[in-house]
Image (cartoon, rainbow, N blue to C red):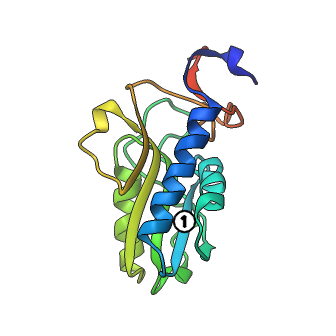
Amino acid sequence: MTPEHLVEILLDADSIRRRVVALGGEISSEFEGEDLCIMPVLDGGMIFAADLIREIKLPLTLLPIKASSYGTATTSSGTVSLPWGIPTAVQCKKILLVDDILDTGKTFEILNSELLSAGATSVHTCALLRKESSNHLKADYIGFDIPDQFVVGYGLDLAGKYRNLPCIGIPRNL
């Protein structure tokens, strides 16, 4: 799987790397002296979260959570599945949810509510991408705003494929 599988590259690997370094610095500054728990939203947020935590210059804990709203489709189903449930280890933790894309906002909305109900002290959000039509949706940290296109690469997939591309682009075979 290579960039030849893409109609267009929206973000190259260098642009992504520079933004991840900047986000890591922002998060490190904001949470300095605090006990932070990073919660990658699997599967899509895994690649971004792995790079991001290496740029956060704080002691932190890592607690992944599985959530899905796309399945094998190219648009959100409108519902969020939490197959692993909410871990009890979130009690009394300051959580930073890290996800690949902010599209409908449902994943962050559901997880925020569920995590606070499970005893997290606060929930903050970080998304690598936010679609143009979702500009009204807020996250504490946004990597890039992108056009309203279905994208793959750097953790984002099409029916499980293309997550390993080092860039983000529009797939050729939709």
Element type at mark 1: strand
The quadrant holding residue 162 is top right
Query: Is residue 21 found left or right of 111 in the rendered image?
Result: right
Work out whether residue 48 can be spotted: yes
The quadrant holding residue 66 is bottom right
Q: Which of 160 and 23 is in front in this view?
A: 23
In the picture shown, does residue 140 fall above or below 149?
below
Q: Position of residue 57 (x, y in %)?
A: 59, 68
Q: Residues within 10 Å of mark 1 (few under 14, many from 20)?
A: many
Q: Which of 13 and 164 is in front in this view?
A: 13
Work out whether residue 111 can be spotted: no
Q: Nearer the viewer, residue 113 or 18?
A: 18
Q: Which of 148 and 12 is in front in this view?
A: 12
Give the residue pinned by disc 1: 39
At horizontal 52% and vertical 28% (from top left) the residue drawn is 151
In the picture shown, does residue 159 fall above or below 137?
above
At horizontal 64% and vertical 33% (from top left) the residue drawn is 13
In the picture shown, does residue 85 fall above or below 5?
below
At horizontal 41% and vertical 68% (from top left) the residue drawn is 30
Q: Where is residue 93 in the image (x, y as percent from the top left)?
A: 47, 81
Q: Where is residue 52 in the image (x, y as percent from the top left)?
A: 59, 55
Quadrant location of the C terminus in the rendered image? top right
At horizontal 51% and vertical 75% (from top left) the residue drawn is 36
Q: Position of residue 65 (x, y in %)?
A: 57, 63
Q: Residue furthest bottom?
A: 92
Three-letter code, disc 1:
Met
